[in-house]
Amino acid sequence: MPRQDLPVTSYALLGLLTFGDELTGYELKQRADNTLRFYWSAPAMSQVYSELTRLTGHRLVKALRGEPTRYRITAAGRRRLERWMRETPAGFPVLKHPVALRLLMGHVVDTAETVAMLEEYATEVRAQRTELQAVRDSLAGRDAPGEAFRNPALVADWGLAYYDSEAEITARTLERLATEQPGEER
Amino acid sequence: MPRQDLPVTSYALLGLLTFGDELTGYELKQRADNTLRFYWSAPAMSQVYSELTRLTGHRLVKALRGEPTRYRITAAGRRRLERWMRETPAGFPVLKHPVALRLLMGHVVDTAETVAMLEEYATEVRAQRTELQAVRDSLAGRDAPGEAFRNPALVADWGLAYYDSEAEITARTLERLATEQPGEER
DNA sequence: ACAGCCATGTAACTCGTTACATGATTAC
DNA sequence: GTAATCATGTAACGAGTTACATGGCTGT
């Protein structure tokens, strides 16, 4: 007997199948890497397959015969997803921010270490932003209200604004650290 | 034979013991709820105890005799933490953002649903911000460069700016959704 | 020929959670 | 007296990871 409720990642993958096409496990993983990655998580390849098996067991997706196997969301799948969205609260985001974590304990190392970490982080944020911008650009032209990629575009813009905010916070924190003598705290 | 590397949460808890005091498991959990929660995670009570057991096994903390048992970081613990900070890269934050996730699939429900979700989120962000502000206020006076709570203050300010950014992004997204006809998409 | 991508899975394992269990002390 | 908080754990479980294994197909 299949269990009643699914992990969120399962719904997330199900949601990626609501854009009108049929995907292989491999392609679904790629779509996750282009979308989910930025604000949810990029499930491992092996997890994509096991979630697809689970979803198939629940008749929420249908495995189409052929080589390679493609998956399509079923009517029941759409209903299930819609009900989940309407009836269960979204919940508050969970952030695992190792940079903030280490900043908290910055007093156990040289300030220079912390500064270097923040500068590296700033670089990585820029890099991630660039990648997300590329994804965003690929949606251009199909992102008007009512069009297929309106929502993905809204989310991508959300992510871009988030990265901009992170970059700014990092810069401000670096400025504040600069007011301290080098080599202090330790 | 104890394993070589620890999960990040273990280091996080170890880090909470570097502020010069000795805590019970219960108190450590409270400190985690006041700090880690906002940008890492609030480990379950049971995990706090099992991490303390693990850390004790590695001699990174010392269980002090008495009722209740208090834990203090050892010299080896400080060295280990410092080495971890210096030698292992922090890594990029992982965000699990159910609101963004559902926004992505907004086309499977009424726009009104999505709007309601975002408004709820805005409310929750304000509430979290208020709680974090209270934590921040409790550090006032001990947050100057060189003082004990300088770094916690920097991190709290980071979190406040993050919440402000989320609030603004949410508001902007709501504005964009308002340009659509109600009841559209579905 | 070899690299790299497409494609699909299994097995072992860790992290972290919830549920359960217990009991002392403090506040009203 | 009884509710809340302090205090400490065990057990079962689930989500998600890495490592391993396999093999076809495509471009150079």
Image (cartoon, coloured by chain):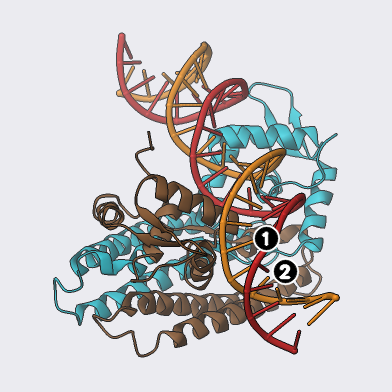
Chain colours: A cyan, B brown, C red, D orange
Q: Which mark is residue B102?
A: 1
A63 lies above or below A143: above
Compare residues A15 and B7 and report the one nearer the observer: B7
User: What is the secondary structure assignment of the residue under circle 2?
Assistant: helix
The quarter holding residue A84 reads: bottom right
Determine contact: label 2, label 1, CB under 8 Å: yes
Q: Dot 2, how many residues are within 10 Å of its Cα: few (below 14), some (14-19), or many (20+)?
A: many
In the image, taking residue D27 as reference, residue B123 lies left or right, namely right
Specify whether disc 2 shares its chain with disc 1. yes
Question: Which residue bears the numbered disc 2?
Answer: B114
The quarter holding residue A107 reads: bottom left
Compare residues A136 and A54 and report the one nearer the observer: A54
Identified by mark 2, the residue type is Thr
The C terminus of chain B lies in which quarter of the figure?
Answer: bottom right
A128 lies above or below A173: above
Identified by mark 1, the residue type is Arg
B101 lies above or below B149: above
Q: Give the percent coordinates (x, y) of residue B129.
A: 55, 81
User: Chain for mark 2?
Assistant: B
User: Is residue A24 shown to the viewer in this render?
Assistant: no
Say which label, 2 or 1, has the lower sequence index.
1
Q: Give the percent coordinates (x, y) of residue A170.
A: 33, 72
The quarter holding residue A105 reads: bottom left
Farthest residue, direction left:
A182
Question: At x 56% / y 84%, what residue is drawn?
Answer: B130
Q: Dot 1, how many residues are within 10 Å of its Cα: few (below 14), some (14-19), or many (20+)?
A: many
User: Is residue B29 shown to the viewer in this render?
Assistant: yes
User: What is the secondary structure assignment of the residue under circle 1?
Assistant: helix
Q: Which mark is residue A67?
A: none
